[in-house]
């Protein structure tokens, strides 16, 4: 865990440094459970692949395993305040000697997927955005007109939190704003990438999505 400068205060997050000592930076955004071991493990996996990954603790120490409590935490999260905290994470990465390049990527899961799109829409230093099965925060009339990032989306056919029409509308909005976007659908449920949840985890879909994510980040972050 590290502290990094926020909007007039310090924020906290989990940092995993690239195994080689330095590499492109990636902001990892939590699911609605909080900064749980699954998210820190994703950061570690990015570090092993040559990236320096930072996951901000958007709930400031609170985590939960109860869906009702997680929903309350997500609903109570102030989008603008979270955006400022995520901007701080981007700046912290770019100021770090363990990060190469002049831009970063962002990868978000569930609630974090929508926040990843929101961050990319507001921060020109984000060059690559990867939302995993999360779009709600991006429905809040986010303006994509100044977005510099390309987008790679991962969606589950069995996920009831959105439908094809919702994602197609998102793709349309992004393309109309001049954003490069590609989406993949998997025969899988919501949170299919979360290997701490065996009831929904899909090993094949998760592996394919991970490989595609690494290739996408490598293309857009110069790795």
Image (cartoon, helix red, strand yellow):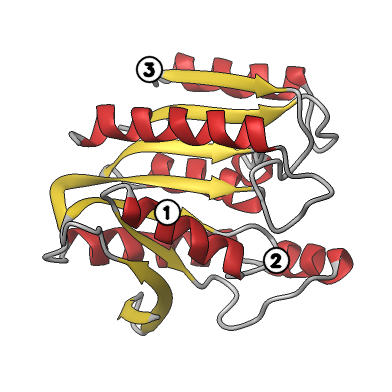
Q: As displayed, is residue 188 above or below residue 25?
A: above
Q: Would you identify the image quadrant in which residue 64 lies?
A: bottom right
* For residue 142, side relative to residue 10 (left or right): right
Q: Which residue is located at x 39 percent, y 18 percent?
A: 180
Nearer the camera: disc 3 or disc 2: 2
Residue 92 spot, x, y in % from top left: 25, 67
The residue singled out by tag 2 in the image is: 33
Q: As displayed, is residue 221 above or below residue 96?
A: above
**Residue closer to the observer: 84 or 38:** 38
Residue 66 spot, x, y in % from top left: 85, 70
Would residue 212 be visible to someone looking at this image? yes
Q: Secondary structure at mark 3?
A: loop
The residue singled out by tag 3 in the image is: 178
Q: Would you identify the image quadrant in which residue 34 lies?
A: bottom right
Residue 33 spot, x, y in % from top left: 70, 66
The residue singled out by tag 1 in the image is: 45
Check contact, mark 3 vs mark 2: CB within 8 A.
Answer: no
Q: Secondary structure at mark 2?
A: loop
Label 1 or label 3, whichever comes before in sequence order? 1
Q: Residues within 10 Å of mark 3 (few under 14, many from 20)?
A: some
Residue 71 spot, x, y in % from top left: 80, 62
Would residue 143 be visible to someone looking at this image? no
Q: As displayed, is residue 173 above or below residue 146?
A: above
Q: Residues within 10 Å of mark 2 (few under 14, many from 20)?
A: many
């Amino acid at each position: 865990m590290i502290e990094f400068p926020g909007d007039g205060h310090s924020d906290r997050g989990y940092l995993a440094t690239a195994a080689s000592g330095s590499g492109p930076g990636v902001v990892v955004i939590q699911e609605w459970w909080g900064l749980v071991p699954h998210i820190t493990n994703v950061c570690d996996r990015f570090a092993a692949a040559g990236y320096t990954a930072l996951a901000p603790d958007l709930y400031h120490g609170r985590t939960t395993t109860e869906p009702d409590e997680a929903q309350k935490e997500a609903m109570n999260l102030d989008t603008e305040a979270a955006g400022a905290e995520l901007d701080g994470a981007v700046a912290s990465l770019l100021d770090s000697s363990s990060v190469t390049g002049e831009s970063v990527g962002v990868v978000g899961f569930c609630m974090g997927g929508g926040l990843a799109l929101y961050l990319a829409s507001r921060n020109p230093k984000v060059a690559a955005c990867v939302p995993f099965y999360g779009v709600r925060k991006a429905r809040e009339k986010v303006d994509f007109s100044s977005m510099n990032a390309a987008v790679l989306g991962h969606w589950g056919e069995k996920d009831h939190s959105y439908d094809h029409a919702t994602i197609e509308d998102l793709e349309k909005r992004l393309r109309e704003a001049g954003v490069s976007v590609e989406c993949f659908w998997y025969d899988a449920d919501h949170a299919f990438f979360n290997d701490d949840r065996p009831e929904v985890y899909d090993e094949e879909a998760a592996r394919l999505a991970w490989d595609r994510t690494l290739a996408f980040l490598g293309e857009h972050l110069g790795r």
